[in-house]
Image (cartoon, helix red, strand yellow):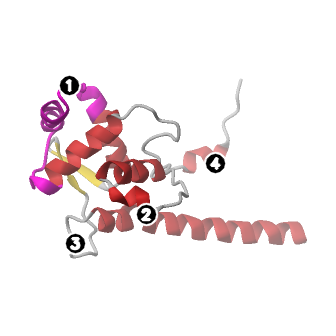
Amino acid sequence: MAQVIPEAEYIRKEIILRQLDLPQSVTLTKKSLLRWCSLSLGLISPKESRDKAIIIFDSLFSLLFKKKEKPTTLDVQASIKKKYSFVVSEKLIRYHLNRLVDLGIIQRKKNRYSINPNPYSEKRGSLSASFDAWVRAPFDQELEKISAALEKLQRIYEK
């Protein structure tokens, strides 16, 4: 029987951040920039050949930023059907949107999705400000804890 590491109960959240080059060519198209952001945030895998997640994120962001709506999964589904002429299951849409919710940059209230605003920024609808509040700041805090723990660990070994 596998033993559970006691510290596993301390885990509150898991975030994948990948260190990627950002060549200018990536920033030239919406699709390549969306794919780059999704890959860097761990929302898609490095060898992801399917583009359903990108299509879902594209539709969500179009509804949020172009149409200034707070869409439901059905709204995203309708947007995909209209733009791409095929249907993506509501379950798959919800799965990918929940990844953004889990990351913290999107929130769901009454089945409607919107940017999870940074409480310290005037840019209430900014993805970047949301990222700063809900990903960067907690990540920086975790890095500080890791650094402190490594220093203590070294001191223990040096005794």
Q: Are marks 3 and 1 in contact (CB under 8 Å)?
A: no
Residue 48 % position (x, y): 47, 35
- Find the distance from the CA under tag 4 to the CA under tag 2: 42 Å
Instruction: Give the amino acid type for the residue marked by disc 3 in the picture.
Output: Lys
Q: Earlier in the sequence, mark 3 or mark 1?
A: 1
How crowded is the residue under tag 1: few (<14 C-alpha within 10 Å), some, or many (20+)?
few
Write down the residue under mark 4. 7
Q: Helix, strand or loop at disc 2?
A: helix
Kindly identify the residue that appears in the image at 42 percent across and 52 percent down.
36
Kindly identify the residue that appears in the image at 20 percent across and 68 percent down.
124
Q: Which residues are magenta?
A: 65-93
- Find the distance from the CA under tag 2 to the CA under tag 1: 32 Å
Instruction: Give the amino acid type for the residue marked by disc 2 in the picture.
Output: Gln
Q: Nearer the viewer, residue 21 or 90?
A: 21
Write down the residue under mark 2. 24
How crowded is the residue under tag 3: few (<14 C-alpha within 10 Å), some, or many (20+)?
few
- Find the distance from the CA under tag 3 to the CA under tag 4: 37 Å
Magenta stretch containing residue 96, yes or no? no
Depth-wise, is mark 4 or mark 2 nearer the camera? 2
Q: Earlier in the sequence, mark 4 or mark 1?
A: 4
